[in-house]
Image: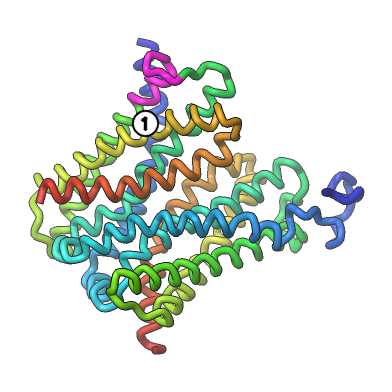
Amino acid sequence: MEGRQRARDIYRQALPVVLLSLVAGLFSGTLLGTETMRTSIERVPGILLLLPAFLATRGGVYGSLGARLSSGLHQGVIPPQITLDRRIVNAIVASFVNGITISVFIAIITYLTLLVSGAGGDLVRLVGIMLVAGGLSAVLMLSVLVVVVFVGYRRGLDPDNLIGPVVTTLGDVFGVAFLLVGIRAVEVIL
Amino acid sequence: MTSPSDGSSPGPPQEPSSVSPEWSVQHIVRTMIPLLAALSVLQLVSGSVLEGYEATLLRYPALLVLVPVQIGTAGNLASIMCSRLTTQLYLGTYEPTLSNPGVRANVVAVFALAATVFSAVGVAAWALGAVLGGGLDLGRVLAISLGSGMLLAVLVVTTSIVAVEASYRVGLNPDDTTIPIVTNVCDVVGVVILFGVVTLVL
């Protein structure tokens, strides 16, 4: 009947986005389950502790940049081209600062939690891992997001509908990978 | 707030001095950092759960495969549900009861989505886990993913309705505040539910 038809429509509209994020999630889960990653989890205390925060805050940092650019475009206060417009540059710089700051913050609260629970962590190592992982995430997410928002807008798509799936999918696919790069890089340097 | 020349005149690209404070680096950083910091602290709760189950996770890679999906999907479903209820609120067709046709259609859709997604996730996690060297059979992985997934659907539906209703009564715009909060709460509780079910099944 009418109600059933309505539920079916919602299901059909939502399924592609949910399935896309599922595939991305499975990809990062598979990386998490690899021998290399399992060894790192065992060797570096705090990796599992910081994982959810690291994966989740990137949505907050870059999702909000997307929403800001999109509102600016809709209101006409920023030009629809990727230029050195003050507002565009400011929004990007601020997101980069936010991404790096919050990565360091996550390393610090993870260290403090380990300290309280008596597990004993290494602050320098955790900060180093998060700086590498957070920095790589920032560069990738910022460049892809800016291109998607502006190109999408010029092609007549509403950026608001693109930002969510793009941020979630990229974040999932590259999040664990960059974390692994961070662990390796710090291992080599320290 | 805004300088007279701000954005309103159709002219060449703005001079630095004409950029309104809302688009300044300091303003964006200052408004975002407290929220991001609070969310990170909240996410430490799921991190602690993961850390507590470290030995189990390392022994059964299929469970590690499940973790990122589980972290993301609950929040995803919650944000779909919340934005739909919010739209209904603006259109004036919302009421906080399951007998409301719009609310009921959303609830049915969320349960159907959860059943689809978490069955697929169970099979995929079992197969990937087997390749990665795990010792969990399909039945148990499926029981974990589908069991926790359906409990998640209950959580998503309840939290979304409560949050949209609460933000309406308090006078907050649900689009700005409710969705980020509900998404993160569902993500955290999602991990807690996952490991509750893991404990029951293993």
Residue at screen point 77% across, 59% down: A85
Image: magenta residue range: B96-108
Tag 1, which secondary structure?
A: helix
Q: Quadrant of the N terminus of chain A?
A: top left
Q: Report if residue B164 lies within the magenta region.
A: no
Picture quadrant of residue A28: bottom left
Say left or right for A148 vs B79: right
Nearer to me, A131 or B36: B36
Residue B104 picture location, percent across and down: 37, 19
Please name the residue shown 25% across and 35% down the image.
B150
**Residue A136 appears in the figure:** no
In what quadrant of the picture does the C terminus of chain A appear? bottom left
Is residue B102 a member of the stretch shown in magenta? Answer: yes
Colouring convention used in this rendered image of the protein: rainbow
Most prominent secondary structure in the magenta stretch? helix
Q: Position of residue A56 (x, y in %)?
A: 43, 55
